[in-house]
Image: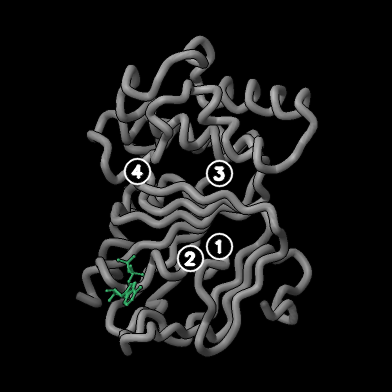
Amino acid sequence: MDARHLTHGLQVAFHETGLTYPNGTVALEDVTLPVREGEFVAIVGPSGCGKSTLLRLAAGLERPTTGSVAVGTRSVGFIFQEATLLPWASVRRNVGLLTDLARLPKAVRRQRVDHAVEAVGLGGFGDHLPRALSGGMRMRVSLARALALQPEVMLLDEPFGALDELTRQEMQLQLLDLYDREGFTALFVTHSVSEAVLLADRVVVMAPRPGRVRAVVDIDIPRPRGPELRFDPAYVAQVQAVSELLRGEQ
Ligand code: ADP
């Protein structure tokens, strides 16, 4: 990690970052992307443009082959498209899984699990097993499991990609609410432009082969944001603008 680029107020800094996988695939080239503390950044782009690779770099799961990646905290949560729950463990056990590893006092762990389960709207389902839950509820458990660590940075890789449209919209509103209340920094990968604009303060549009940043769009829509936004002309115009940037490169 090269902390030089983590200047005041930044939580994540990609600086001239490149990553070439050992098989020669150039996944990312010259990505410079500063992310402010508490900012919500969405990343959109076609398959293969390096979105997941960016998150894996931020999580420390990959190292850049050129340039640097700096993250200002060790407290990082990662959420994937699959909820990846233990099938034999209750909702509460699943939510507490990572805090159990964090060697916190038992009372603190219990309090964090309670808070996280309530925060995602699963109060009353704590003793249920994953198979008794819908896809949306399983994703809520996955969100709660990350939240229980009280992460300063939340990395989300297409978390709602496998959900039906209605559930997906519910989860977007749930995430907006969690973001407003918990105040983490978010890096959110999605294929959906409307989802990116709804959630983010800035949308990064990426281009493929090699993966690079094509454009960064500021989303000047005040928070809190609610479902009525979907019909707001300012929102619709931003979705159109980002869609055009995305189409321009394909
Ligand atoms: P996205 O998330 O935008 O779909 P990825 O970051 O998953 O893109 O992948 C970027 C490029 O790197 C793709 O061409 C992909 O095939 C390639 N890639 C991803 N992971 C590996 C890996 N472990 N080894 C080799 N190539 C990889």
Task: Name the quadrant where ligand 1 sits.
Answer: bottom left
Instruction: Give the SS element for disc 2.
Output: helix
Q: Amino acid at mark 2?
A: Arg
Colour scheme in use: one colour
Q: Is residue 181 above or below residue 202?
A: above
Residue with the mark numbered 1:
59
Instruction: Give the SS element for disc 3.
Output: loop
Quarter-wise, where is residue 213 in the image? bottom left
Residue 109 x, y percent position in the rendering: 71, 29
Disc 2 Cβ-to-ligand 1 distance below 8 Å: yes
Numbered circle sitting on residue 222: 3
Residue 212 x, y percent position in the rendering: 39, 80
Who is closer to the viewer here, 222 or 134? 134
Q: Classify 10 Å Cα crowding around label 1: few (below 14), some (14-19), many (20 and above).
A: many
Residue with the mark numbered 2:
56
Asked if one can make out residue 211 in the rendered structure from this viewpoint, the answer is: yes
- Distance from disc 1 to disc 3, alpha carbons, whole Å, reads 29 Å
Q: Amino acid at mark 1?
A: Ala
- Distance from disc 4 to disc 1, alpha carbons, whole Å, reads 17 Å
User: Are the residues tagged 2 and 4 within 8 Å (C-beta)?
Assistant: no
Who is closer to the viewer here, 70 or 103? 103
Who is closer to the viewer here, 194 or 233? 194
Numbered circle sitting on residue 82: 4
